[in-house]
Amino acid sequence: MGAVCTGLQAGLQGSGEGGGGGNTNFPLFGPQCYSCGKTKQGKKNLWDEYPKGSDTYDMVKDWALTPEKPLQIRYTCNGFGESLETMTRPLHGATITEPTAFHLACTTLFPWSAPCALVSNAKHATEGRGKLVVFAEVSCLDIFVSIDGKVQDDGLVIKHKESYTDPCVEEKPPQGVWCTLVSGEWGRRGKDPNALHLPLVIKDDPTAACLNASHDYATDFNTAFCQMVARAGSGVHSYTLRLSPRGYVEDSEHGPTSFGVSTYPWKKMDEATKTYYKDLTKKTFSSDEDNSNLSATFELSVDSEILAMSTAAAQRPAPEPIDADDYKEIAECGMKMSGRCLKTAGDVLGEEVSGMPDHVILAPSKDYGNDVGYCAGGGAGSDSNKKNQYYFVHVYYLWKGSGDDGVMVRSTLEKYVTRDHQTLESPVWETASVHEGNKIKNAQIDIAKERDADRF
């Protein structure tokens, strides 16, 4: 993928005889997204597209959104079922004390497919029409967290569906990120209200109080956040949270996706504008790091039950292995790549972890069950079909600790057979991402080793 666009890019201006001058792109969820000029009809500002008296207008008014503040991070400690309208409290500056439930919602004017560029077409000018507003489909959310000033850089990746991929997902997560959350459901307008739901602390079933788009990642995300909170310990702690969404412009054979229309026909665009738009599809778009609307500092304390979650997880046995024919080969490859998980293992265990793991387990995935998974797609749009094809598998690395507790870290291995439409002659397994870590009793590690002796 090309560079991430986080600012105005004058160098991408349309040019040439008859071309659309003044083409610009801009960061996601900043003021330019919603006060960026007139829509294709040439009559309205984007912010005024929802008429007064509509449900969306009232919701945006309740959330105190404006063109200058088009996004807010809000929270609730109540169950809300299918409604986000109870989330009326800004997170920044809040103090949350021992909640039984703690949900965040990033409230926006539009669902999570944000304006990212304006296209000024010469044919628009001759027709007296406004600029075309191009949308980016947001599929990745990089979440940066610090607790009492200490950066939490676990580098976790949580996907709503393991086989899902697109141009943003194919990029490596940024340095210093606590968790990258991936979903292909956020940008579907009408799928959920104008908010992205993050279930942080839920004592009961995390999926019981979720929206459509958050249901598939709720359990993993809730578990990861509670484990991070447990590391901080009891009492009140200061948290700083920064969200950084990433999106891409779909490369469609029919025309660009725009506001108010599913596609805008290529035949209505001059060649310079077509070239500019094609350049947009080679990039991913993110937000500015200094966008204050995407950050919040708050205080949080959790009760003993939440703090005990990691301890409870440590009593569980190791995962069951899959029945893959090449189990031993993959496990041996995974053993050699376990080094990326050492830091996460040490953070969870609370002591230095080094060397090869004591055991490796290839575990089932929720998409492909008791075997190695296979992703045959890659990218968005028909032009990108089969751009990347690869096998993947979950791997658990287990290290014994100095006391009774050991540690188990989940990772994902991938083996590409096709990358960027090119068939690889000698595909190899590689570490794709490091996920969550849990404590596990040393005795449970010994049991798993004996159980799997004939496999690895």
Image (cartoon, helix red, strand yellow):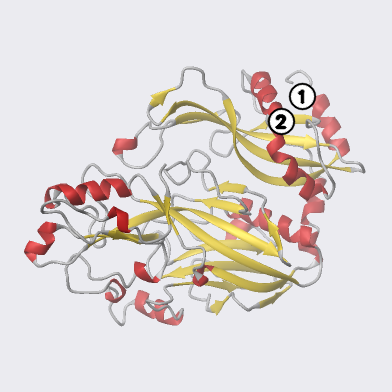
> In the image, which is nearer the foreground, mark 1 or mark 2?
2
Instruction: Give the spatial CA distance, label 1 vs label 2.
Output: 8 Å
Residue 125 or residue 252, whichever sits in front: 125
Q: Is residue 357 above or below residue 51?
A: above
- Contact, CB < 8 Å: mark 1 with mark 2? yes
Q: Residues within 10 Å of mark 1 (few under 14, many from 20)?
A: some
Percent x, y for residue 267?
A: 12, 48
Residue behind mark 1? 452
Query: In this rendering, would 217 be left or right of 350?
Result: left
- Element type where label 1 sits in the image: loop
**Image spot of residue 253 (x, y percent):** 23, 41
Q: Count the marks.
A: 2
Can I make out residue 5 in this image? yes
Q: Residue at x 62, y 18 (%)?
A: 326
Pinpoint residue 64: horizontal percent, then vertical percent. 45, 81
Callout 1 amino acid: Asp
Report the front residue among 61 and 134. Answer: 134
- Residue marked by disc 2: 361
Image quarter hosting the C terminus: top right
Residue at image point 75% right, 68% down? 302
Question: x and y percent of residue 186 in the render?
Answer: 44, 56
Q: Kindly identify the amino acid type of the residue bearing the numbered disc 2.
A: Ile
Above/below status of 81 relative to 5: below
